[in-house]
Amino acid sequence: MRAITRLVRKGIRRVAGEDGQATVEYTLVGMCAAGMASVLLTWVNKTPLLGTFFNAIVKHIRGLIG
């Protein structure tokens, strides 16, 4: 009877443990980051802000070079 009790307790500890918790957390963080990046890229593609920003940088560099 003691052997069975030990096996059951050992099984419960394995199930109740936090093995794999970090993997799940990293997966969720990665999914959230991908979602945010998708929203950001969609917004950037719909607005002319990024093109205007890079054009201003290129014009400034050309002005410095001469």
Image (spheres, rainbow, N blue to C red):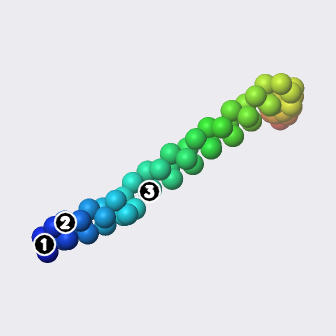
Sooner in the amino-acid sequence: mark 3 or mark 1: 1
In the picture of the structure, the residue carrying the numbered disc 2 is: 7
* Number of the front mark, 3 or 1: 1
In the picture of the structure, the residue carrying the numbered disc 3 is: 21
Q: Can you give x and y, in whole percent of width and height, for residue 56 in the image?
A: 86, 31
Q: Can you give x and y, in whole percent of width and height, for residue 60 in the image?
A: 85, 34
The structure residue drawn at horizontal position 62% and vertical position 44%, both measured from the top left corner, is 32
Residue 20 lies left or right of residue 66; in this view the side is: left
Q: Is residue 28 above or below residue 54?
A: below
Q: Secondary structure at mark 3?
A: helix
Residue contact between numbered discs 3 and 1, judged by CB atoms under 8 Å: no
Image quarter where the C terminus lies is top right
The structure residue drawn at horizontal position 19% and vertical position 71%, both measured from the top left corner, is 6
Sooner in the amino-acid sequence: mark 1 or mark 2: 1
In the picture of the structure, the residue carrying the numbered disc 1 is: 1
The structure residue drawn at horizontal position 26% and vertical position 69%, both measured from the top left corner, is 9
**Res 38 visible:** yes
Q: Quadrant of residue 49?
A: top right
Q: Secondary structure at mark 1?
A: loop
Say few, some or many: other residues with alpha carbon within 10 Å of mark 2 (under 14 / 14 to 19 / 20 or more): few
**Res 58 visible:** no
Q: Can you give x and y, in whole percent of width and height, for residue 38 in the image?
A: 68, 32
